[in-house]
Amino acid sequence: MTDLDHLVVVQEHDLSLDRLRRQRATLPARSDLANAESAIAAITPGLSDLAAQRDVVARDAHRLDDEVASVREKSVAADKSLYSGKVTAIKELQALQTEIDQLVARQGVLEDRELELMQALETLEAEVAALDAQVQVHTAAAALARLEISSGEADLDAQIAVVVEARNSEAYGLPSALLATYELVRGRANGVGVARLVGNTCQGCRLSIPANEIDRIKRGIPGESCCDNCGAILVP
């Protein structure tokens, strides 16, 4: 085999590497992971806001519950004093009764407000739980996608390593100038740095080459003739 024949094989390996690396970069699980992470990012702000609202309402409800308990204790204490027999003065008894009435009224107002808060809290907790469940679903999907990506990368990395070794073995001993030209052309021509000339057609771009150019190529120095269309080094 000539150096150009070996270079054609090198390119076959390079094209295989290009394909494998594209596969690695575009594993379907990457899209699944991106979708899951995007969904979590979209839900998180709303979930945080609802959780903050829930916490505020829960604190207010707890504060009201403590206040109701305090008012109830005062009402019970006043009621005991009223019926203890220790207070006999009419004005004091009337004052106790007025205090009890006010405390009962205050307790009713507080309990109504507490009920409103508890209903609001129940609604907020349900909304938070619903969003949190969505986050958990997407989190599980993201975890599965990461596992699939890891597995896919490991499999493709193993294949890439085999092809790289074969490519390096084939490239070993080729003239450095030829390899440099090949790499330069390949970088400009979508991965095709060398192509066979079959008849009057460049197999790199599949375009025809004029007959006089073909004659010049065949008479020229191997490795120094390139396709005028795609730039690939031509192998007659």
Image (cartoon, helix red, strand yellow):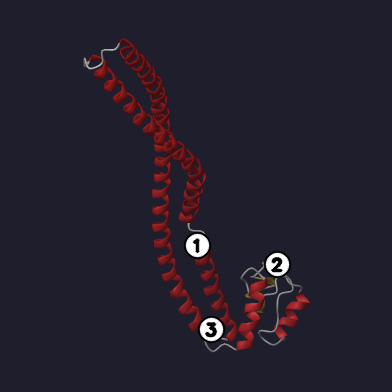
Q: Image height check: is 156 above or below 30?
A: below
Residue shown at 41% from the left, 41% from the top: 132
**Apparent side of residue 196 relative to residue 97 in the rendered image (left or right):** right
What is the crowding at mark 1: few (fewer than 14 residues within 10 Å), some, or many (at least 20)?
A: some
**Between disc 3 and disc 2, whose residue precedes?**
3
The amino acid pointed to by label 1 is: Gln
Q: Which residue is mark 2?
A: 207
Q: Which mark is residue 192?
A: none
Report crowding for label 2: few under 14, some 14 to 19, many 20 or more residues within 10 A (C-alpha).
Answer: some
Tell me the SS state at disc 3.
Answer: helix
Rounded to the nearest angstrom, the CA distance separating label 3 from label 1 is 24 Å
Q: 122 left or right of 169?
A: left
The residue drawn where x is 78% and y is 78% is 212
The image shows a total of numbered marks equal to 3
Tell me the kind of residue under disc 2.
Leu
Q: Position of residue 108 (x, y in %)?
A: 37, 19
Nearest to the eye among marks 3 and 2: give it: 3
Q: Secondary structure at mark 2?
A: loop
Q: Earlier in the sequence, mark 2 or mark 1?
A: 1
Residue at 66% across, 78% down: 184
Could you say where residue 102 lies in the image, as x and y percent from the top left? 38, 17
In this view, the mark in front (2 or 1): 1
Q: Residue 4 appears in which quarter of the rendering?
A: bottom right
The image position of residue 18, as x and y in percent, is 54, 68
Q: Out of 203 and 142, give the one closest to the viewer.
A: 142
The residues tagged by marks 2 and 1 sit, at their Cα atoms, a distance apart of 28 Å
Kindly identify which numbered label has been placed on residue 23: 1
User: Does 170 sit above or below residue 188?
Assistant: below
Which residue is tagged 3? 171
Distance in Å between CA atoms under marks 3 and 2 = 27 Å
Mark 3–mark 1 contact, CB under 8 Å? no
Quarter of the picture holding the C terminus: bottom right
